[in-house]
């Protein structure tokens, strides 16, 4: 157990040291779009979808955040099915008309390996609609070949990259050559929350009204007004 905590701390320290400038750079671009009426949409398959859910309707988190739900790519519909569908070429084509991107939106595509067709196609669709596209991925996987018919990986499509530094195979411990103890969710959630914290601080510096959910468990908040403000585009 203690070894796992040590490894998590080591990776978190590395991400903080190596990605802080990129987080600030990306945050500035997102703030421009939020102040022009855009929202942040997040997409992932399987466990990556858990990170999209992490940021949604979150006490202390940004209000204009919308996870893109495609049920057959989510774990509760069948873990093996979600993994298989993510790898199918053109799987997202039948869902394209359901996507709702404005040209001031931001789309964060979450994929540790960044080589499967579904996240790559989502980045393409969002970019075609004029959204700012950002990947949350591990560049440790960049030698893994793309499964997309274009031959491109996610980092070849998106406008910006947030590198989680997750090791190949995800696990940070080994026993008898068995790799275990994954860190992708911890590192991904930390990077996303750090990004959103930077966005909130930049909005505050600009004197903007802060679209931040208060906890419904500790007293009065402005949540209902914020939900009314963004409710036409985000289902709360």
Image: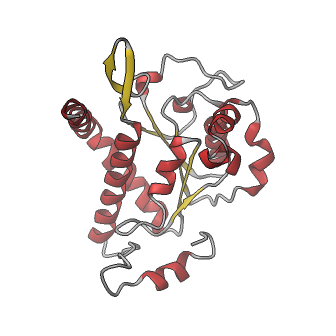
Which residue is most to the top?
177
- The image quadrant where one finds the C terminus is bottom right
Query: Which of these two is toward me, 44 or 206?
Result: 44
- Up/down of 233 relative to 150, above or below: below
Image location of residue 49, percent across then percent down: 54, 47
The answer to whether any part of residue 109 appears in the image is no
Look at 56% across and 60% down and name the residue there: 104
Look at 50% across and 49% down and name the residue there: 50
Look at 38% across and 26% down and name the residue there: 180
Image location of residue 219, percent across then percent down: 31, 85
**Viewed as shown, does residue 17 lie left or right of 125?**
left
- Up/down of 104 relative to 182, above or below: below
**Viewed as shown, does residue 163 lie left or right of 13?**
right
Query: Which of these two is toward me, 72 or 116?
Result: 72
Image location of residue 205, percent across then percent down: 26, 69
The answer to whether any part of residue 174 appears in the image is yes
Look at 33% across and 48% down and name the residue there: 190
- Up/down of 143 relative to 68, above or below: above
Which residue is most to the right?
94
- The image quadrant where one finds the N terminus is top left
């Amino acid at each position: 157990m203690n070894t796992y905590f040590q490894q998590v701390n080591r990776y978190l320290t590395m991400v903080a040291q190596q990605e802080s400038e990129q987080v600030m750079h990306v945050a500035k671009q997102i703030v421009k779009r939020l102040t022009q009426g855009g929202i942040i949409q997040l997409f992932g398959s399987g466990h990556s979808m858990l990170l999209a859910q992490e940021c949604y309707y979150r006490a202390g988190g940004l209000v204009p955040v919308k996870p893109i739900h495609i049920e057959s790519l989510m774990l509760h519909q069948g873990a093996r099915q979600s993994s298989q569908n993510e790898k199918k070429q053109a799987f997202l084509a039948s869902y394209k008309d359901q996507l709702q991107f404005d040209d001031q939106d931001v789309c964060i595509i979450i994929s540790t390996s960044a080589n499967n067709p579904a996240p790559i196609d989502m980045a393409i669709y969002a970019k075609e609609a004029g959204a700012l596209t950002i990947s949350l991925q591990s560049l440790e996987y960049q030698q893994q070949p793309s499964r997309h018919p274009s031959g491109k990986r996610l980092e070849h499509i998106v406008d910006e990259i947030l590198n989680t530094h997750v090791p190949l195979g995800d696990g940070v411990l080994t026993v008898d050559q068995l790799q275990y103890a994954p860190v992708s969710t911890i590192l991904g959630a930390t990077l996303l929350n750090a990004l959103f914290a930077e966005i909130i601080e930049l909005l505050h510096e600009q004197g903007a009204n802060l679209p931040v959910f208060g906890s419904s468990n500790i007293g009065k908040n402005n949540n209902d007004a914020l939900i009314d403000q963004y409710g036409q585009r985000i289902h709360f």
